[in-house]
Structures are given as C-alpha cells and as structure tokens.
Amino acid sequence: MNKSLLIILLTALSFQSFSQYNSEGADLISRFRPGSMWFYTGFRPATPEKVRKYDRLMFDLTYNTFNGDLKAFKNSWKSIGLNTNLMFDIPITKGNTVSFGVGLAHSLFRVETSGKSFNPDTSYTFTELSSYQPFAEENRYLIGNSFSVPLEFRFRTKGWKHFKVHIGGRIGYQANLYSKTVNHYFNGKQVFKDHTFADVNPLIYSAHVRIGIRNWALYGSYNLNALFKNKSSVQLNLFQVGLSVSLF
C-alpha cells in the first residue's frame, strides 16, 4: 500500500514538473549571466527588471616583461603569467553602461632572464644585475606572486553583446619573489631557487586597461613602482600584455 502511494505521488510530481516548463523568457537567459555560468541565477529565477552585472570572475593570461634596466619585449615568449580577479560590479548608471569594479586579485608572473644573473647582496640589501654566457641547456626565470585590491571604472555599450573598456589600477602586497635556474642534462635536470633578495619592494601599485567585446578583452598593465626598493638595485618595472576572459 505504502509503495503504491509513493509511486503515485512521484508520478504526479513528475507530470507537474513537466507541465510547468514553457519557453517564456528563454531569450532573456543570456542577458543576465554572460559567460560560462549564464544559466546560473542563484536560488531564485532572475527577473527582467534586475540590473545586469558583468565581469565578476576574470582571468588575465599575460606575456610578462620588464621596463628599466632590462629592455621591454627582449625576453622569451615563455615569460607567461596569470592574474585571477574576483570582482564586484557596482552599477553607476541605470542600464549599467558605467560601473565601478572592486575586489581581490592574485597575480603570478614569470619572466625568462637567461643570460642575466640577479645577485642579491644581503649585507648592503641591494640586488645587482650582470650578464653571462648561459649553458646551451639552461633557463633562468624571475618569478613572483602578489595579492592586491583592483579598482576600476568600467564603460560598456548596451546589451549583453557589448563593447567594453575598463580603466583602473591595483594596490597590493608582493608575497614572494625568487629566481629559478633549470639546467638540463642527458639524464635529467637540476632546479635551483634563490629566495634571498633582501630589498624586494613589498608594496605594488599599477595601472591597467581592458578593451574588448563581451567576455573577451585585450589587457595591459604597468607597475608604477620598481621591483626592488633600494636605489642602488637594478631598476625594473613589471609590464604585462595579454588576453582577458570573463567567466561570470
């Protein structure tokens, strides 16, 4: 008896759920969540009056180089980095054609520096740069991780297939910086890391811009302060160019 009632109840619920589905408002789905999560609207369905919000989870895939004592764009294409941005989109205008973005970001940069040697001087707390003849199978990198608060003004045309421009900057903390040497041999490889830079600038502040359409944009960023804070150190400002994708 109980099994029969359960089967009848489940059958009724199934028919009810199918009967509730219709195509009304199907053309509005992509307007609310333009990205890989555009079908997600939270615990409740989105309403037509709800203000559209964009670019809340963004990834910047970048080519990294330095400006200063090392000339920009002279390093290898293997100098790849990744910025992860978790942002709030705060509308300023009624149609959200102008908004303010603020959030948290993590940045990983790697610059290939083969033929250049960074020599930390812990007694005088400055870092020297020298040239050398690298081995045929040697690669050197300068690698850093940082956390920051990005702030930006966002301008976009109407509609979810919009043209957009983001202009802003970020201020944050350089969590670590180290050099990495990889030597390749016929029977394997050796990896050496040096974390002894005594004059790393803990504060970072930079300006950036994104220009694109909908989920995709070209990205550029420039650190306004040098990587090393001692005036006797090698002077390097991080410069990034790449591609941004917004998933949510």
Image (spheres, rainbow, N blue to C red):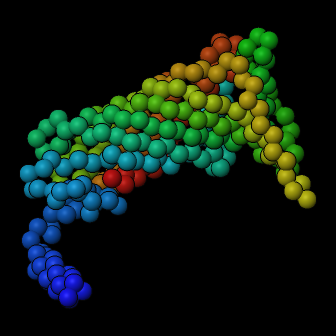
Image height of 183 relative to 119, above or below = below
Looking at the image, can residue 67 be seen? no
Q: Give the quarter of the image for residue 92.
A: top left
Position of 160 with respect to 207 (left or right) is left
Image height of 22 relative to 44, above or below = below
Give the camera-side residue of 185 and 137: 185
Residue appearing at x 72%, y 23% in the figure = 197
Give the camera-side residue of 84 and 16: 16
Position of 130 with respect to 162 (left or right) is right
Give the camera-side residue of 74 and 14: 14
Q: Residue furthest front?
A: 1
Residue appearing at x 17%, y 43% in the figure = 96
Question: Could you tell me residue 149's position as x and y percent?
Answer: 41, 30
Q: Give the quarter of the image for residue 74.
A: top right
Question: Could you tell me residue 108's position as x and y percent?
Answer: 57, 40
Q: Give the quarter of the image for residue 191.
A: top right
Residue appearing at x 9%, y 71% in the figure = 24
Q: Count the marks: how many?
A: 0
Question: Could you tell me residue 204's position as x and y percent?
Answer: 51, 24
Looking at the image, can residue 90 be seen? yes
Position of 193 with respect to 17 (left or right) is right
Question: Could you tell me residue 117's position as x and y percent?
Answer: 79, 31
Give the camera-side residue of 159 and 144: 144
Q: What is the quadrant of the N terminus in the image? A: bottom left
